[in-house]
Amino acid sequence: MEEYNIQKEIADRYSLRGRVYNTIRDKILSGDYRESEELRENTIATELGVSRTPVREALRQLELEGLVSIIPNKGAFVTGITKKDIHDIYTIRSYLEGLCAKWACDNITNAQIEALEEILYLSDFHARRSHFEQMVELDNKFHDLIYKASGSKILNHVLSDFHQYVERVRKITLSRPYRAEQSRKEHAAIVEALKNRDGDQAEALAHEHMKNTIQNLTEQGL
């Protein structure tokens, strides 16, 4: 019983730390915590109803990721995602998304293809009604499904992180009708390649999808 309680205590601690870490990270990536803003341990701990320890641990982890800068005797400050970071992420994603789509051709199930087709249908439905929040959510589901279909937990993890890092920018780009329509057409072409199990074509289309996003960001000055 004692051993069980110790293990449970450890599990609860790491679960709590994970919740605090994810909350702070999400607020940085969404822009709720702005660049250069000080992250006060006491304030965050009070907001989340936790002690300062998991907040401190979370800030240290976020410093390792480059999202927070901890200055001795001064405090922790938001570094955030710069314009260069965004372009770097999309450039890296352009290659990894291509690889992911190629591998997915060998592993994707009929049920997953049907799910992607449903996402395309719903994306068209919401785009015609300018439901931008739903479009962003569907975009998340589209990419997440292909990440899982790749059969690589490593690729899934890396791309999922990158996808979250640029969430704020994706909301901006998908709120623009032209890019939203272009993105849906690119998604449809990728699904068709997946249905045909054409790995080379799926890779090329997924790569091009990211390159077009980079071009769109440049045109918007993002």
Image: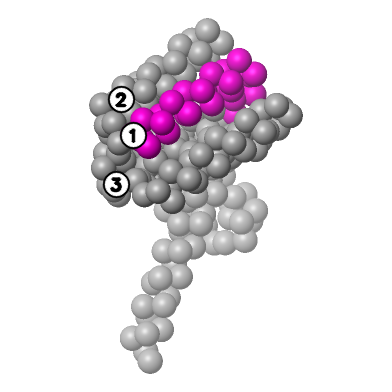
Amino acid found under the numbered disc labelled 2 = Gln
Gap in angstroms between the C-alphas marked 3 and 2: 15 Å
Quadrant of residue 96 in the image? top left
> Which residue is at 36% across, 30% downward?
193
- Vertical side of 88 occupied by 197: above or below: below
Front-lying residue, 180 or 72: 180
Q: Sequence-wise, which precedes: disc 1 or disc 3? A: 3
* Amino acid identity at mark 3: Asn
Marks 2 and 1 in Cβ contact (< 8 Å): yes
Q: Describe the element under mark 3 as helix, strand or loop.
A: helix
Residue ID for mark 3: 107
Q: Is residue 120 visible?
A: yes
Which quadrant of the structure image shows residue 157?
top left
- Image coordinates of residue 82 in percent, x first then y, are 46, 22
106 w.r.t. 13: above or below:
above
Crowdedness near tag 1: few (<14), some (14–19) or many (≥20) residues, C-alpha within 10 Å: few
Residue depicted at 49% across the width and 62% down the height = 16
Residue farthest right in this picture: 129
Q: Taking 184 as reference, is 3 left or right?
A: left
Question: Who's the residue at 66% across and 28% down the image?
Answer: 127
Residue type pointed to by label 1: Asn
Predominant SS of the magenta segment: helix
For residue 201, the mark is 2
Q: Which residue is mark 1?
A: 196
- Is residue 42 left or right of 86 when viewed as pictured? right
| Label 2 – label 1 distance at C-alpha | 9 Å
* Stretch of the chain drawn in magenta: 171-196
